[in-house]
Amino acid sequence: MTIRTGAPVVVGVDGSAAGLDAVRVAVQEAAHRRRTLRVVHAFIWPLLGVPVGPAPGAPAGGGLRHEAERHVAQAVAEAGKVAPQVPVTGVVVDGAATAVMLAESRDAALVVLGHRGLGGFTGLLVGSVSVQVSARAHCPVLVVRGEPHPGGPVLVGVDGSELSAAAIEFAFAEAAYRDVPLVAVHAWLFPSPAGPGEALPVVYDGDYQGDDVNRILSESVAGYLERYPQVVVRHRLVRGTAAHVLVEESKNAGLLVVGAHGRGALSGLLLGSVSHAVLHHAHAPLVVVRHQPERH
Ligand SMILES: Nc1ncnc2c1ncn2[C@@H]1O[C@H](COP(=O)(O)OP(=O)(O)OP(=O)(O)O)[C@@H](O)[C@H]1O
Ligand SMILES: [Mg+2]
């Protein structure tokens, strides 16, 4: 029997189809990591003073609390179908979704959420719970969106910052679990003439910049090659803005991993513009990493 110790993988469910997609990904993450899965539904109504039991005279088994418990039971059952070897618990926790999931993230190896939930409006690209939890969680957050690409590589955005190093470490572990290649992507922009007659800046040295960005890529991954000899690593230097490049490259990825903010982080900024953009537009599930790894 597999011994499962350490923090669980936690998945948030709200009764939506996207929440169930998150459960299917979360239970596989738990299986890879040899962790348990904890299914959580945050139940706001008692805080708002709304009656949560069955209406007077109505048969037992109705009411909002019962419905909340049904969401959890359905998610636990779904997890059991996907990876029956993973022990799963389910809870209804009274509170607002973001606050509850942030509290859960303190003791989680990973929090998994759908990109949308039951609320929002048509055309909303990502829900408020997903954005806020990604921005403030105490552990990495996996937001399930886009198409699943089974066997697709793990893609990691590299910019030489401290958090991109944390993202690289996370991405190596994921590529090893999944037995897929790791693609380290660095997007870069250099000046080019906008049209005939326009000159490049005098101090600009394209070769030098090319060497420089190559060095960022290889130095960033070098430390992990020994620890993960089984992971095939590819480097991609792509010209363009980081957000565009990562969104584009995510079309065939199994998972995209980014740091919560990059080198341009203003102090106190919770999510950088690239992390924000990929949360809204990525074509694959993505992970936002905001701390040095401890538990994952
Ligand atoms: N009450 C909840 N309890 C636990 N997890 C939740 C809850 N609400 C949402 N989530 C999680 O967050 C994911 C995204 O839902 P979110 O609420 O952010 O989007 P939305 O409902 O479409 O938009 P919004 O609520 O911002 O109007 C869900 O798929 C689910 O994983
Ligand atoms: Mg919602």
Image: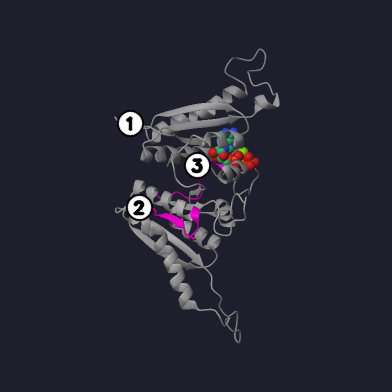
Q: Is residue 193 magenta?
A: no
Q: Secondary structure at mark 2?
A: loop
Q: Residue at x 58, y 46 (%)?
A: 135
Q: Earlier in the sequence, mark 1 or mark 3?
A: 1
Q: Earlier in the sequence, mark 3 or mark 2?
A: 3
Q: Residues within 10 Å of mark 3 (few under 14, many from 20)?
A: many
Q: Residues within 10 Å of mark 1 (few under 14, many from 20)?
A: few
Is residue 100 or residue 73 the one in the foreground? Answer: 100
Q: Quarter of the image holding residue 55?
A: top right
Disc on res. 139: 3
122 is higher (above) or lower (below) than 82: below
Q: Secondary structure at mark 1?
A: loop
Residue type beneath disc 1: Ile
Q: Secondary structure at mark 3?
A: loop
Q: Nearer the viewer, mark 2 or mark 1?
A: 1
210 is higher (above) or lower (below) than 77: below
Q: Nearer the viewer, mark 3 or mark 2?
A: 3
Q: What is the spatial separation of the Cα atoms under label 1 and label 3, in whole angstroms? A: 22 Å
Q: What is the spatial separation of the Cα atoms under label 3 and label 2, in whole angstroms? A: 23 Å
Disc on res. 3: 1
Label pair 1/3, CB-CB below 8 angstroms: no
The residue pinned by badge 2 equals 180
Q: Quarter of the image holding residue 31?
A: top left
Q: Earlier in the sequence, mark 2 or mark 1?
A: 1
Q: Residues within 10 Å of mark 2 (few under 14, many from 20)?
A: many
For the C terminus, the quadrant is top left
